[in-house]
């Protein structure tokens, strides 16, 4: 299992970036039914983790997402987008994910 943090960077939202990558096949190409089903598993995981600060994917689903990431043609090279893509590329197991503490004002 791999955990991807949902870190929003400027105008780029991690959840929206992943959704756009998964929903759009490569330009000038179609997508097979089998590949569509594989991508749907990622979309289902996104739906299940609404409101969460991370996305947990089974290894096979993460492999599909990494394949999409490695071949997807982006329309921009903004640093904020690349930071979200780095979070996807560098995903680790949930138990290896650093835990951040929320610091309250005045504490």
Image: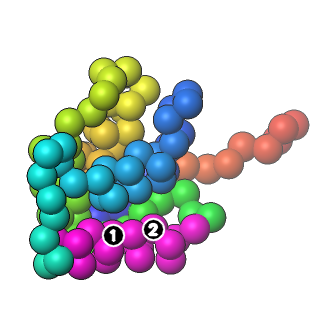
* Closest to the observer, 75 or 84: 75
Q: Label 1 vs label 2: CA separation? A: 6 Å
User: Quick check: 44 left or right of 67?
Assistant: right
Whether the magenta-drawn stretch holds residue 41 is answered as yes
Q: Nearer the viewer, residue 5 or 44?
A: 44
Q: Residue at x 41, y 76 (%)?
A: 44
Q: Residue at x 72, y 43 (%)?
A: 103
Which residue is tagged 1? 42
Can residue 51 be seen from the camera position used here? Answer: yes
**Location of the C terminus (image quadrant):** top right
- Disc 1 crowd rating (10 Å Cα; few below 14, some 14-19, many 20+) is many
Q: Which residues are magenta?
A: 35-50
Q: Return the x and y of residue 33 as percentages of the image width and height.
A: 17, 77
* Residue 8 vs residue 107, the one in the foreground: 8
Residue 60 marker:
none
Q: What residue is pinned by disc 2?
A: 46
The answer to whether 54 is drawn above or below residue 73 in the figure is below
Q: Quadrant of the N terminus?
A: bottom left
Percent position (x, y) of residue 2? 28, 64
Residue 13: image location, x then y, percent: 51, 42
Task: Say whether residue 92 is magenta.
Answer: no
**In the image, what residue occupies the spot 13% across and 71% down?**
32
Q: Position of residue 17 (x, y in %)?
A: 41, 46
| Way the structure is coloured | rainbow
> Given contact means CB atoms under 8 Å apart, are the residues at marks 1 and 2 in contact?
yes
Q: How many marks?
A: 2
**Magenta-drawn stretch, dominant element (helix, strand or loop):** helix
């Amino acid at each position: 299992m791999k955990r991807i943090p949902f870190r929003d960077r400027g105008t780029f939202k991690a959840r929206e970036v992943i959704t756009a990558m998964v929903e759009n096949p490569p330009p000038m190409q179609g997508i097979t039914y089998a590949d569509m089903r594989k991508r749907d598993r990622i979309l289902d995981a996104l739906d299940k983790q609404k409101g969460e600060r991370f996305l947990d994917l089974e290894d096979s689903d993460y492999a599909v997402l990494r394949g999409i990431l490695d071949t997807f043609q982006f329309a921009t090279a903004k640093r904020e987008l690349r930071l979200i893509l780095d979070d996807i590329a560098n995903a680790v197991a949930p138990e290896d994910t650093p835990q951040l503490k929320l610091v309250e004002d005045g504490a």
